Image: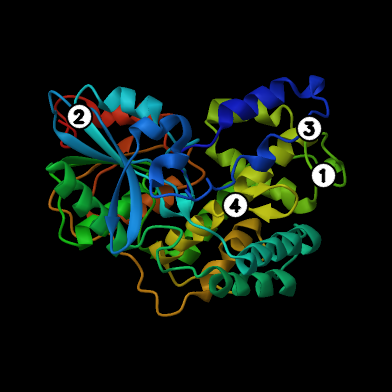
Amino acid sequence: MVLSRNWRRLLGIAVAAATLTACGSHADTSHQASPTPKHNDPCASAARYANACSYVTVNGADYRYSLVGGSKHPKPLALLDIGGPGLSLFGSGWPSDILSQLDKKYDVLVLDEPWVTADESSECRTSLETWYQAIRTSWQPKQTRMPTSIQDASRAIPAACTLWNGRWGWTPSTYTSAVDAILAKTERKLAAFVGFSFGSTRLAYLTNAGINVPTVDLISPFPTGTSAVALIRARQAVLNTAPKFSKALIGKQPATRSVPIAASDLAAAQVEAQYVPPAAQTTLYKHAADATLVGHLSDMLFSRYGEDDIAPSMLAFWDETCPAAHDWPTAAEAGITNVLYEVCGSQHNQKPVTPGHLKVVPCIVATRHDGIVPLPLLRRWTKTNRWPIRPGVGGHADLRNLTRCMEPGNAAGN
């Protein structure tokens, strides 16, 4: 999943819960895609980041990126992957904090995901709405099997939205082609790769294409090529012991949300809370009976806005996550984690992505408080590849852990 969510904003919601009034939804529109430019400049919709936006065209497709630094006194070039899938670089995903750490040593290249400027068909939008409605109306926490309505809606999405062809997320070929084109355009070569969370899978795209980078730093990496069953079970095990939000909220209507709280919102909020740093989670759970907070958390997980609209960031999530693991179950147990991944069971003839063979030992930092990539799962992955793990602090993709790789004398990042 994504490197970071807007957890600071969520804390603000929690702290201000008692004073919130009906002033219109905030989260309902936060995940809408940027409109596709109506003229020839793909960077026109980059808004306040337009000056930082550049693009290349490969096989008729435009790919946006930003190259930070390097104009007068170039430094070694690092490719930064901030994770995802489903992040908008020139929106909420702009990595100011990460860049402030890296730009002392590197010029930094960052790519935007394809979904941000892609258009959805009406058929696709309807399919996503049907999926979300099925979850809201038929999902219950104690079900032993996934409801048929959710299964059917999940299976309809890949065809309706043309998943797994590079429209929404990267494919190994589109990612490597875009990187090659940018390096050729800028006349640069990569000195380092820095990946947060799902960045490990983008590294695999490069490695499997024979593109090797001298220095590799991975923070809370997604275990690319892992068993989907192992992934789901590991995440569900975290949720089984995590605090829960109040059942008394079901049916309540938050002032800033267009739909009332459903049972699925409580479960979705619990998943989304795993992206929040452990110390901040404590604050969130002090407000476990606040409907506004739960609604925001749930909407962030499902990329919901409006009433039943789902942003294409969700399509990017499936587009890349599904091929990054293998043997996805279908019609499985009805846990909310299974519901999120039910779409993946509809893959046909999709070759799973594997980590590839790195020529260097990567610097990998992980933490035992990570509910998105649980440490036991990551240990199995790194053991298979004979890669050491350095202990980190905080939770998933905590920025502070980048310093573990940037310290002088480390095998990577030195």
Q: Which of marks 2 and 4 is in front?
A: 4
Q: Which of marks 1 and 3 is nearer the N terminus?
A: 1
Return the disc, 1 or 4, that comes first in the chain's sequence: 1
Q: In this view, does 4 lie to the left or right of 152?
A: left
| Residue type of the residue flagged with mark 3 | Asp
Q: Which residue is drawn at 67% across and 38% down?
A: 27
Q: Is mark 2 on a helix, strand or loop?
A: loop
- Please say if 221 is above or below 172: above
Where is residue 138? Give x, y as percent.
79, 64
* Screen quadrant of the C terminus: top left
Sequence order check: which comes first, mark 2 or mark 4?
2
Residue at point 25% right, 57% down?
176
Cα–Cα gap, marks 1 and 3: 11 Å
Q: Which label is found at residue 106?
A: 2
Q: Compare residues 158 and 122 and report the one nearer the observer.
A: 122
Q: Quadrant for residue 160, please give it.
A: bottom right
342 horizontally vs 202: left or right: right
Please indicate, yes or no, whether residue 241 appears anywhere in the rendered image: no
* The label number, if any, that marks residue 311 in the structure image: 4
Q: Distance between the residues labelled 2 and 1?
A: 49 Å
Q: How many residues crowd mark 1 within 10 Å: few (<14), some (14–19), many (20+)?
A: few
Q: Is residue 216 visible?
A: yes
**Mark 4 crowd level (few <14, some 14–19, many ≥20, 10 Å Cα):** many
Which is more foreground, mark 4 or mark 3? 4
Q: Nearer the viewer, mark 1 or mark 4?
A: 4
Mark 3 sits on what residue?
290
